[in-house]
Amino acid sequence: MQIETTRFGQLQIDHSDILLMPHGLIGFESSRHWVLLSNPAGEDVAWLQSVAQASVAVPVVSPRRYAPDYRVQIPQRELSLLHLRNEDQMFVLTVVSKNGQTLTTNLKSPILLNASRQLAVQVVCSDDRPMSLPIGLTTTAATVLKTRQAA
């Protein structure tokens, strides 16, 4: 399947690579189909690209890279959307934003990904985690991210 993207041009993706997000992302609730793309400039950042909206791509990181003790505590009803089994691979991602000249990641609203079933949900945590944790990216990844966010 081919999709058009503003940031990455035309992409060839397999149907099996499409993530279903039943509730979309905060601010993009109508976009329910996404693909997770690696960053050509390095592995610090990946991108969630909307399949339906060419101009919507959201940078994401593994929060444990910047907050090693990070743990997500959410109600069981929200986890049930992921249809988790013991053998499923579960990942946690957080959205990267630019706050002035600083890059931050949002620990309050992580994205939980069941990679085995290609299902994901963004949840809002009620703990005392920061919404904007400053992060340090490799120089190359930060430059590409800042450039692409400005586009």
Image (tube, rainbow, N blue to C red):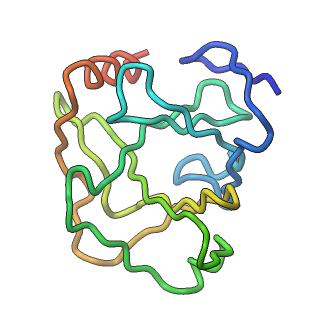
Q: How many marks?
A: 0
Horizontal side, residue 46 vs residue 65: left or right: right
Who's the residue at 80% across and 40% down the image? Answer: 15
Who's the residue at 28% across and 34% down the image? Answer: 98
Horizontal side, residue 32 vs residue 138: left or right: right
Q: Nearer the viewer, residue 126 or 15?
A: 15
Who's the residue at 56% across and 52% down the image? Answer: 25
Name the spot of residue 57 as percent of width and height, x first.
53, 32
Q: Nearer the viewer, residue 57 or 119?
A: 119
Name the spot of residue 5 as percent of width and height, x first.
64, 20
Quadrant of the rendered image containing residue 124: bottom left
Quadrant of the image containing the C terminus: top left
Name the spot of residue 17 as percent of width and height, x first.
70, 41
Q: Is residue 76 above or below residue 55?
A: below
Most extreme residue toward the front, as rendered?
A: 87
Name the spot of residue 109 as percent of width and height, x first.
40, 61
Q: Is residue 110 above or below residue 99?
A: below
Who's the residue at 38% across and 73% down the image? Answer: 125
Horizontal side, residue 67 vs residue 123: left or right: left
Q: Nearer the viewer, residue 121 or 113?
A: 113
Horizontal side, residue 56 vs residue 54: left or right: left
Q: Nearer the viewer, residue 86 or 71?
A: 86
Q: Is residue 57 above or below residue 27?
A: above
Most extreme residue toward the bottom, as rendered?
A: 76
Quadrant of the rendered image containing residue 144: top left
Quadrant of the rendered image containing residue 6: top right
Quadrant of the image containing the N terminus: top right
Q: Is residue 128 above or below residue 43?
A: below
